[in-house]
Amino acid sequence: MIQRIQTVYLVLGAVALGALLFFGVVWQGAATAQSWFTPAVVLGDSLAVAVALGAIFLYKNRPRQRQVIVAAQALTTVLLLVFCGGLYLEKALYVRTAQGLDVGMLVALLLPIVAYVLFLLARRGVEKDIEQVRSMDRLR
């Protein structure tokens, strides 16, 4: 299970999404003004992390694992839309301030994108495993 590279990608993607909740710069403005923002982001983030971690244990059923990873990608996309949409509605979607670049906000906006890319790499690894098993079946 841990020997497969897609397991590493799934864990790193889940860590990236989990780290999103610990950036205080995001929760300062939008969380207080929009009552739906905090529960929606926390629920979407937790659900995407749970699905990604659940996909790790489906290593014996690769087609199902691929479907679950696609679901994690879809949840990450929805999370990114809700996250950026809430920040946009609150007019808090900025990375440049008068003092310079707001690194905390930039990292918080990039974490779901990084997680999506890691889930994409995990899905490609699962598809490669599926193709390898098919080619071995042809040789028998």
Image (cartoon, helix red, strand yellow):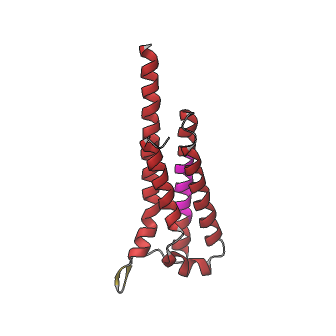
Q: Is residue 40 above or below residue 68?
A: below
Q: Which x, y percent locates residue 89? A: 55, 74
Q: Which x, y percent locates residue 92? A: 49, 77
Q: Which x, y percent locates residue 117? A: 42, 52
Which image quadrant is residue 68 in?
Answer: top right
SS assignment for the magenta stretch, majority: helix
Q: Nearer the viewer, residue 48 or 91?
A: 48
Which image quadrant is residue 121 in?
Answer: top left
Task: Please say whether residue 76 is one of the residues in the magenta stretch.
Answer: yes
Residue at x-position 52% and y-position 72%? 22
Residue at x-position 59% and y-position 66%? 41
Which residue appears farthest toward the top when viewing the image? 140
The quarter in which the C terminus is drawn is top left
Residue at x-position 52% and y-position 73%? 87
Task: Please say whether residue 7 is one of the residues in the magenta stretch.
Answer: no
Which residue appears farthest toward the left when viewing the image? 100
Which residue appears farthest toward the bottom when viewing the image? 98
Provide the residue span drawn in magenta. Answer: 70-82
Would residue 96 appear left or right of 68 to someone viewing this image? left
Q: Is residue 83 above or below residue 137?
A: below
Would residue 24 appear left or right of 40 to someone viewing this image? left
Residue at x-position 41% and y-position 15%? 139
Instruction: Count up the numbered dots.
Output: 0
Q: Which x, y percent locates residue 12? A: 45, 55
